[in-house]
Amino acid sequence: MDKEPMTNVGYKKITGELDFLKTSERPETVIALDEARQLGDLKENAEYHAAKEKLAIIDSQIAELGAVISKAVIIDPSTLPHSRVSFGSTIEIVDIHSDEEFSYAIVGGVESNADKGLISFNSPLAKQLLGKEEGDEIKANLPGGVKTFEILSVSYKELSL
């Protein structure tokens, strides 16, 4: 069985989303579907079709989150050494050519959010960074081409939702 490594923060976020879908979003949609059904002719009932479609999407999300949770392996990054880049490390890197600096935390796939600086341990950049240490240079084959980065620092910082 595939395992899905994640931090405790990521696990809480996903179980929270699942709980919200099951206890709030789905019951509200079922009520909306019942109310729309009572409006009569189902062939031309836009509210009914919209609610039915929304319910199908919610059920699919519930199944997807349930599958992820069943494969979850919670890793506490605070217990790992961060002298080298590992799961949960926060890395400061600089693009050697543009001098642009970036900060990323390496997390599980379901937690990743590049806009928030959270990259999946499976991403091309993270794969190049894992095991490296401060001062190392890496060449990363990224969607925008090959870039060379220097690792400025490797540390552990507590993540928040």
Image (tube, rainbow, N blue to C red):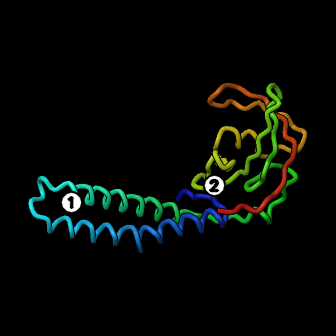
Percent position (x, y) of residue 90?
78, 52
Does residue 85 appear left or right of residue 39 in this picture?
right
Q: Quadrant of the C terminus?
A: bottom right
CA separation in Å, label 2 and label 1 = 38 Å
Q: Which mark is residue 108?
A: 2
Q: Secondary structure at mark 1?
A: helix
Q: How many marks?
A: 2
Does residue 58 appear left or right of residue 159 in this picture?
left
Residue at horizontal 69 percent and vertical 48 percent from the top: 117
Residue at horizontal 66 percent and vertical 38 percent from the top: 124
Percent position (x, y) of residue 2?
54, 56
Dot 2 alpha-carbon crowd within 10 angstroms: few under 14, some 14 to 19, many 20 or more: many
Nearest to the observer: residue 38 or residue 5: 38
Furthest residue in direction right, as rendered: 135
Furthest residue in direction left, as rendered: 41
Residue at horizontal 71 percent and vertical 43 percent from the top: 126
Residue beneath disc 1? 48
Nearest to the observer: residue 149 or residue 161: 161
Q: Nearer the viewer, mark 2 or mark 1?
A: 1
Dot 1 alpha-carbon crowd within 10 angstroms: few under 14, some 14 to 19, many 20 or more: many
Q: Is residue 122 above or below residue 107?
A: above
